[in-house]
């Protein structure tokens, strides 16, 4: 990662978000094959996993962001455009009308890649923090 290492507080927030993203992905994978559960909960949890993964990256980079479920906005802060999952973040919870058909396999794949990406960023940040702490310890001796 470019720039300075994240603060211990930022690492703590990023770790929490990464754990929650992994849980959302796990829930989506569990409910997806169940024929009695419609695509709403799957769409919600994959959207949440991707959203939290983006927030991990933003947190580690020290980017301030408002409380939002808008993946397009978060992507605009971090990477290229997305867009097709943002409606699943909150709309399905408040409206009984289906948004559109969700390609669950693709959604699960994207969420898995996003969670793996954020976990990699977090591991890199943790390694940088350990290296800096080790260097400081060496200088103090």
Image (tube, grey):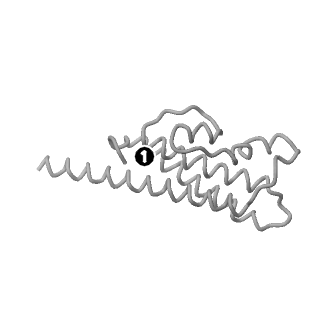
Residue 30 rendering spot, x and y as whole percentages: 71, 65
Q: Is residue 66 left or right of residue 39?
A: left
The residue lying at 58 percent from left, 52 percent from top is 20
Q: Count the marks.
A: 1
Q: Is residue 117 left or right of residue 71?
A: left
The residue lying at 63 percent from left, 42 percent from top is 71
Q: In this view, does 106 lie to the left or right of 96?
A: left
**Which secondary structure lies at badge 1?**
helix
Is disc 1 surrounded by few (<14), some (14 to 19) or many (20+) residues within 10 Å? many
The residue lying at 77 percent from left, 55 percent from top is 102
**Mark 1 = which residue?**
11
- Decide which of 48, 87 is in the foreground and name it: 87
- Decide which of 3, 49 is in the foreground and name it: 3
Residue furthest to the front: 80
Residue 116 rendering spot, x and y as whole percentages: 52, 59
Residue furthest to the left: 141
The residue lying at 15 percent from left, 52 percent from top is 138
Q: Quadrant of residue 81?
A: top right
Residue 39 rendering spot, x and y as whole percentages: 80, 56
Q: In which quarter of the image is residue 73?
A: top right
């Amino acid at each position: 990662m470019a720039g300075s290492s994240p603060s211990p507080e930022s690492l703590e927030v990023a770790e929490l978000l990464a754990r929650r993203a992994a849980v959302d992905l796990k829930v989506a994978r569990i409910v997806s094959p169940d024929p009695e559960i419609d695509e709403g909960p799957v769409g919600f949890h994959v959207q949440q996993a991707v959203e939290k993964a983006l927030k991990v990256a933003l947190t580690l980079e020290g980017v301030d962001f408002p409380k939002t479920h808008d993946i397009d906005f978060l992507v605009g802060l971090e990477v290229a455009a997305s867009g097709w999952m943002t409606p699943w973040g909150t709309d399905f919870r408040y409206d009984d009308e289906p948004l559109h058909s969700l390609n669950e396999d693709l959604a699960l794949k994207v969420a898995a890649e996003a969670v793996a990406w954020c976990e990699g960023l977090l591991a890199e940040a943790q390694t940088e923090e350990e290296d800096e702490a080790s260097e400081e310890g060496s200088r103090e001796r």
